[in-house]
Structure formats: structure tokens, C-alpha cells
Amino acid sequence: MLTKFLEKLGQDTELLEAYKKDPKGVMQKHGLSDEEVKAVLSGDDQAIKKVTGSVKVQSYILVVIGNDEDAK
């Protein structure tokens, strides 16, 4: 489920925009388990490998750009 979600996230600009605003909520809405959500939010490669059930995991880099207030 996580791998399919991340693939869709890379292809769907509307989904990406929603994810930037509420990553946890968007992942939950798309059926990811609490463990999957926690792994993604942690950024821990080992945790992500564990929840995908694969030792061969494609890496995904998510860049979130804050608003102007964040840059100050």
C-alpha cells in the first residue's frame, strides 16, 4: 500500500499539494496504516523497509517547501 501511495504521490500534483499541507491526514485518507504513516514521517529508511516488507526498496525523496514565514 505504501509503495503504491508514494508512486501516486510522485505523479499526482493535486495529491502532492494536499500532502504538503497535511502529510499524516493524506496518508491516513489513502489507507496507510499507523505504522506506515509513522515510518514515513520518521524518515527512517529501515522503518520504511520494514513496513514495505521488502529488503529491496526504491528510495523516494519528498521535498516540502515552506511558506515565506518559514524562511525568516
Image (tube, helix red, strand yellow):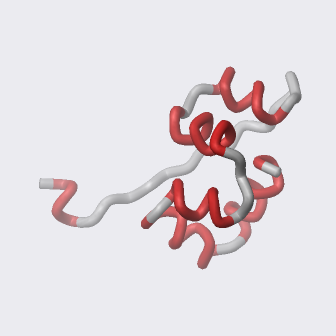
Check the image and report above or below for 31 versus 15: above
Q: Between residues 34 and 19, which one lies in front from this camera angle?
A: 34
Q: Between residues 1 and 3, which one lies in front from this camera angle?
A: 1
Residue 21 shown left or right of residue 62 in the figure: left
Farthest front residue in view: 34
Residue positioned 68% across, 21% down in the render: 46
Check the image and report above or below for 14 versus 39: below
Residue 72 shown left or right of residue 22 in the figure: left
- Quadrant of the snapshot with the C terminus: bottom left
Query: Percent position (x, y) of residue 47?
Result: 66, 25
Residue positioned 46% across, 63% down in the render: 22
In the figure, residue 35 lies in which quadrant?
top right
Q: Between residues 32 and 70, which one lies in front from this camera angle?
A: 32
Residue positioned 55% across, 33% down in the render: 43
Residue 64 shown left or right of residue 13 in the figure: left
Farthest bottom residue in view: 14
In the figure, residue 30 lies in which quadrant?
bottom right
Check the image and report above or below for 33 versus 57: below
Query: Percent position (x, y) of residue 6?
Result: 72, 54
Q: Between residues 68 and 4, which one lies in front from this camera angle?
A: 4
Residue 59 shown left or right of residue 23 in the figure: right
Residue positioned 86% across, 22% down in the render: 55
